[in-house]
Amino acid sequence: MSSLLKLSPKLGWLAQDDIRPFVLARNECRVTDPGQLFSLDWFVNDFFYMDPLVIEDVYFANALLNMEHKAFASNDMPMPRWVFYDCAIMPGFVAGFAQRTERLAPSIRKILGEENLLGEWTPISMFITIPTMKSHEWMAHNLSSVNALIPKEDRFYGLGFLSKAFGLSYANIEWCCGVTQWTSPAMRLHTYYGFFEVLTAYTPAHTHATSLTYRLKVNPAEWSRFFTKEASKEFDQRFKPAGFEVDPEDEKSLIAFHKKISHKEGPFYLDAKEIREKKLHEKLTIYNLKG
């Protein structure tokens, strides 16, 4: 049994024979030694490949875009098709989980649309990551799932978190960067993959200037805390309050924080447990390294 399944009975869906991890990548982008960097036994079902450059597999790419567009429609950030191809399929890969189409819950079939359920497998989540010019560093580009679209009773516990975890593990990713919004529920997820360094607190080059850019060294030892909700002893040992807070809903506060970053007063970090316990609009403590 996967050690992950011991954390919660709600994770039993991972062992279902109708659900498997997948990797959508052209042949040249497939990892030659997947899952070798981290010693994980979380993903008990073998993954399968889909090739977006093969005509017979395009239905799967279409299904991913359909799901992503519905998930991000409310915040006006659905991904254009050309961005999916240029920025995901060609340089990077897509990972996630898929369910046998015939076994999909009625709520999933309804939200995705019967006309889009065309193959043996239907993706129910996606994590896109792209290699950067910096050695061993990748950019987390997109994370979405059906969980945001269906009733609570039909959701797959931890689906989004595990989709990203699978992608990071599959590609042996050592450093991960990403962008998210300060008041997004995704903050409660992204901060658990490693110690969360803030690279930009205010990001006017982005469509949403009040986004933050982060970087973390991928640390699977921290991942189980997403499910146990325990505090990180290592975080307490390595970091201390920097002496100020940031207000996620105050642009002036974000800019003031960003100036500290620009003036090389950091590096600065956020505490995953604090983010988990506070409401999304509440002020957050900023941390830096001890010593």
Image (cartoon, helix red, strand yellow):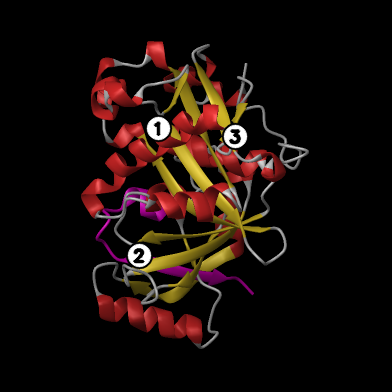
**Residue annotated with mark 1:** 63
- Residue type beneath disc 3: Asp
Where is residue 193 drawn, in percent x and y? 55, 48
Secondary structure beneath label 1: helix
Answer whether residue 107 is magenta in the image.
no
Q: Which residue is mark 3?
A: 51
Q: Are marks 2 and 3 in contact (CB under 8 Å)?
A: no
Q: Which mark is residue 223?
A: none
Q: Give the labeled residue for mark 2.
A: 284
How far is the residue under mark 1 from the one under mark 3? 14 Å
Q: Quadrant of residue 283?
A: bottom left
Q: CA distance from mark 2 to mark 1?
A: 38 Å
Name the residue located 67 percent from the left edge and 66 percent from the top edge: 133
Where 240 falls versus 167 (above or below)?
A: below
The quarter in which the C terminus is drawn is bottom right
Q: Is residue 90 left or right of residue 111?
A: right
Decide whether residue 281 is among the magenta residues.
yes
Q: Which residues are magenta?
A: 273-291
Quadrant of the drawing holding the N terminus: top right
